[in-house]
Image: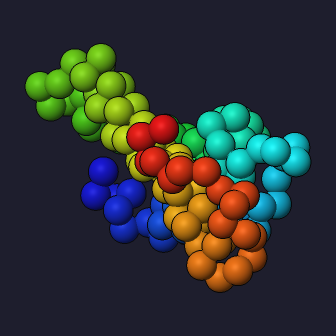
Amino acid sequence: MQYKLKRPAVYLYFLLAFVFTALAFANGAMPLDEHQWINGSSAIAFYVAIMSLMMMMVSSSVMGLPLIRDIEYNTKEYYLSYPITKAGYFWGRFLSSFLFVLIIDSAVLLGACVGSKLGPVFGWQPASHYGPNNFIS
């Protein structure tokens, strides 16, 4: 887990997902109908579905790294010499990587919320194209 905090790729993935999403929602660069809000629930669901394709590549990059490192440096036997089970070893590796994937994926929803605020502020889209901006929704 400490290794992932030191990797610049994790921060870069988060930043790219956040900026890309915030700009898309601020500019209204989404396939919407005339009477559909840019930050409506169906628009956010559609955008998250499209971004999930990109996030699959990010997930494989983040989650595959511990496996590659263990195979390359042959550290599996070293870790299993400690009083840890194979299941504990696997779930520890999996859950720490999964936590970072969730943090990176949260950039999409955070970017949609921020982009919905920035669009009217910068004058890129009229405020009437945005609905109520509730993060929970």
- Can residue 103 be seen here? The reply is yes
x, y (%) of residue 100? 41, 47
Q: Nearer the viewer, residue 84 or 48?
A: 48
Q: Residue at x 46, y 48 (%)?
A: 134
- Can residue 23 be seen here? The reply is no
Residue sitting farthest toward the front: 128
Image height of 32 relative to 21, above or below:
above
Q: Residue at x 58, y 42 (%)?
A: 59
Number of numbered labels in the structure image: 0
Residue sitting farthest toward the bottom: 122
State how the image is colored: rainbow
Residue sitting farthest toward the left: 83
x, y (%) of residue 71? 50, 39
Q: Nearer the viewer, residue 121 or 75?
A: 121
Image height of 122 relative to 33, above or below:
below
Q: Nearer the viewer, residue 96 or 34?
A: 34
Q: Residue at x 61, y 51 (%)?
A: 131
x, y (%) of residue 52? 68, 39
Image height of 18 relative to 134, above or below:
below
The reply, left or right, for residue 71 in relation to residue 58 is left
Q: Residue at x 60, y 78 (%)?
A: 121
Task: State the image quarter where residue 89 is shown.
Answer: top left
Task: State the image quarter where residue 41 is shown.
Answer: top right
x, y (%) of residue 37? 71, 48
